[in-house]
Amino acid sequence: MTTLLVTRPAPQAAELVTLLAERGLDAISVPTVEIAPAPPDGALDKAIQSLDGAAWLVITSVNGAAALLGRLTALSASLPVGVRVAAVGPATAAALEMGALRVDHIPPRYRTVAIADGLGDVAGRRVVLARADAATADLRDLLRSRGALVEEVVAYRTVEGPAASRDRVRAALAQPLDGVTFTSGSTVRGLHALLSPPEALRVTALPAYCIGPVTAKVARGAGFAVPVVAASHTVVALAEAIHAHLSKEIS
């Protein structure tokens, strides 16, 4: 049986493991990142309390959605009228909608230009990006080049290469592995942080299956071959893409 390494954070890994199992694929879960939520009275709270007058609030991940909803609940707050919400990826949108937030825009592709284009004319308008501390500056810089007044807020911290996973990754490497799944650039960096140089050489010889083009770019930069990128930014699409690719290899 084909065995894949799943690198998602612990609370989210089970979904992908189940989706792979439903397609006849085995998985070993080793979280290569941990998610640390925003603290009370931190930057996210201040951003929530000063959203009045913003044109857009952009949430780029399920973790960002969870962080936002958690702090809204803790503060007994709601989004001001007139603030529109953009969610990157259908899973992020679903998480926000489950928390009773209306999503006004879901970009058709997980690419910086597609996200920015969906916000329309942003010249002179406030756009708040609630993201991980490890997020790239690409979206911020593009929006600013279009005249937006961009405010970045760290909604959660991503701890790459958590110490608790060191023994788990070595146990996983003792098993025969046929590939690695990545759902963010931080999962790629987190895996590398857990590996010795010889282990990294062995692991980067495996194919990397990625949830989107941004993640794939990071994986390639780390030395992986990336035969599959999911058609949409969801774990369902990732599992389907992996299964389709491996089925072609077998046939």
Image (spheres, rainbow, N blue to C red):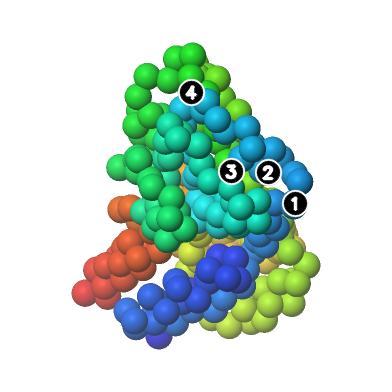
Query: CB of mark 2 within 8 Å of CB of mark 1?
Result: yes
Q: Is residue 46 left or right of residue 3?
A: right
Vertically, is 48 above or below 223?
Answer: above
Checking the image for residue 45, the label placed there is: 2
Q: Quadrant of residue 197?
A: bottom right
Q: Who comes first in sequence, dot 1 or dot 4? A: 1
Residue at label 1?
A: 40
Amino acid at pointer 3: Arg
In this rendering, the label closer to the viewer, 1 or 4: 1
Quadrant of the image containing the N terminus? bottom left
Q: Quadrant of residue 165?
A: bottom right
Q: Who comes first in sequence, dot 1 or dot 3? A: 1
Quadrant of the image containing the C terminus? bottom left
Q: Is residue 196 left or right of residue 9?
A: right
Residue at label 3?
A: 131
**Element at label 1:** loop
Amino acid at pointer 4: Leu
Query: CB of mark 2 within 8 Å of CB of mark 3?
Result: no
Q: Who comes first in sequence, dot 2 or dot 4? A: 2
User: Camera-side residue: 15 or 5?
Assistant: 15
Q: Residue 32, position in %: x, y?
A: 64, 64
